[in-house]
Amino acid sequence: MKIRLNIPASQYEEVKNDLEKHGIEVSDDAPLVLSSVSGYSDWLEVRQDKDHLHIPVSEVIYIESFGHDVLVHTKDGTFNSSERLSYLEKTLDPSLFLRISNSVIIARKQVKKIRAAFTRKFTLALSNGSEVDVTRTYYDIFRKEYGI
């Protein structure tokens, strides 16, 4: 059996060693995922070309999806994720991340400027220079979360 681990970094090596002692292979390309229910992810598994990487969630600026493609944007570049946006939303700490549209999750601390529009929308300028829109569906949630 082959599984992928999505657990806090502090527990990763211990859990991996225990599973391998019992004949379970831990691999970044496994179809099954073992997740921690006691906390949120400390890192995200991403791909860049053919390499699988783990990036700390503290480096994430925003995550966006285009159809089946999910892109994780950091100050160091853009990476692909094999996870769905809805799954990532559940694994990220809601005190650090906020969904602002059907296709975008932002890191709360990465918002540098909020610009209101007439059509119940906001445009956010992020720390890497990107701009993303808070859609009407998420408008009231965003206002409440940011006290606007």
Image (cartoon, rainbow, N blue to C red):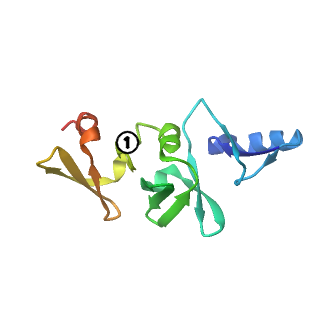
Residue sitting at the far front: 67
Q: Quadrant of the N terminus?
A: top right
Along the viewing direction, whichever of 33 and 38 lies nearer the viewer? 33
Residue in the picture at 48% in, 46% down: 85
Does 79 sit above or below residue 7?
A: below
Residue sitting at the far bottom: 49
Residue 10: x %, y % from top left: 65, 42
Residue in the picture at 52% in, 47% down: 84
Residue sitting at the far left: 118
Bin the neighbour count of mark 1 within 10 Å (Cα to Cα): few under 14, some 14-19, many 20 and up.
many
Along the viewing direction, whichever of 139 and 146 lies nearer the viewer? 139
Which amino acid is tagged 1?
Leu
Residue 72: x %, y % from top left: 48, 57
Q: Quadrant of the C terminus?
A: top left
Task: Find disc 1 in the rendering and name its residue.
Answer: 98
Residue 117: x %, y % from top left: 14, 51
Residue 110: x %, y % from top left: 35, 53
Q: Secondary structure at mark 1?
A: strand
68 displayed left or right of 105: right
Residue in the picture at 54% in, 60% down: 80
| Badge count | 1
123 displayed left or right of 7: left
104 displayed left or right of 50: left
84 displayed left or right of 101: right
